[in-house]
Amino acid sequence: MRNDQYRMPSLLTIVALAVLLSLPVISAQTSTASANDGRFYVGVTVPVERVNASYDKTVDNTQARNPRRGQVLQDHDSDDTFAYGIGLLAGYRLPLAESGFYLGGEVDLAFHGGQVKGQLPGRGESPGRNQPGESWPDRWSFEKNRSYGFTIKLGGSPGVLRSWDTSIYVLGGIRLIQAQFANHYRGCLHVVNCTSTTQPEFVSGMDSRDLDYTAWTYGAGVEKMLSEQLGLRIETRYTQYNSKRWVELFSDLGVRVPTNIDADEVGVLLSLAWYF
């Protein structure tokens, strides 16, 4: 499965480079037109983002059959990292009468790299905080794999920007994000405490979960026309993910473990757009 994920970005990189190499040739063969005219466009994108993720875990021993019966322990950790990617886009720009402003709609697909990593501090009274009913100090990771988006843009070239072949715009949209969460654990799953002299009683392993997020994106950008058909864009964006929650049940022990993963990101999107 991981090999497929790495092959897809490589294929997308080849396609993106082919598009970039063909743009000057196609541009020279097309007729002169303004980027503010109503027309279609395609392009390539390079997103660079600061992704923040938080991991909240509750160990509910209300009905447990262990030494911590009745206790409810809450644990939290968060971290962030830089993520990067490459993608393709397609859209249409519609001028708004003679006002100089335009309205655009755009769809895109992007593949991402970068992994947020952290470790829960753990909650409990034992030295390792890994006895039954305690919140174990899990090592965890959050990885954004790919995303799909639809974005609306409203902009124009007021004042001197028109003579510079430059426009500014605001944007808003929705994204569907595919991510993966994993946690590595080690602890005791017995009804009574495990002892330091019986290490085989402790269990360890890794759980992973695919997460599909719906996210809202807001931002602003500037576009400079490098030729009659080719535009260079720089955008700043903020994206808020919806929360993901689930509950793990250890019925043999009577323990419930509600889990919550939150994430958001702020970043810069560089893109080249070729107008038909």
Image (cartoon, rainbow, N blue to C red):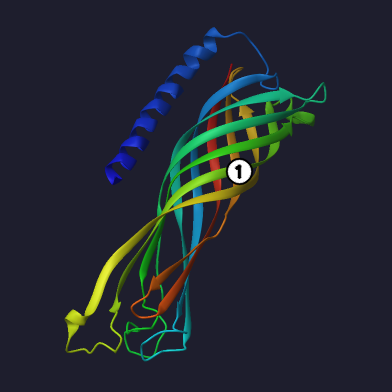
Left or right, 61 with respect to 92, comes to left
* Res 85 quadrant in image: top left
Q: Position of residue 166 (x, y in %)?
A: 68, 29
Q: Position of residue 33 (x, y in %)?
A: 66, 13
Comparing 178 with 116, the one in front is: 178
Can residue 121 be seen at all in this image of the molecule? no
Q: Position of residue 196 (x, y in %)?
A: 21, 89
Whether 145 is drawn above or below 86: the answer is below
Q: Quadrant of the N terminus?
A: top left
Can residue 245 be seen at all in this image of the molecule? yes
Q: Position of residue 12 (x, y in %)?
A: 39, 31
Q: Quadrant of the C terminus?
A: top right
Left or right, 92 with respect to 264, comes to right
Residue at image mark 1? 174
Whether 32 is drawn above or below 141: the answer is above
Whether 114 is drawn above or below 119: the answer is above
Q: Element at badge 1?
A: strand
Q: Amino acid at mark 1?
A: Ile
Left or right, 101 with respect to 127, comes to right
Left or right, 39 with respect to 100, comes to left
Q: What residue sits 48% from the left and 83% below the top?
A: 72
* Res 186 quadrant in image: bottom left
Comparing 62 with 17, the one in front is: 62
Comparing 116 with 149, the one in front is: 149
Q: What residue sits 58% from the left and 50% below the top?
A: 239
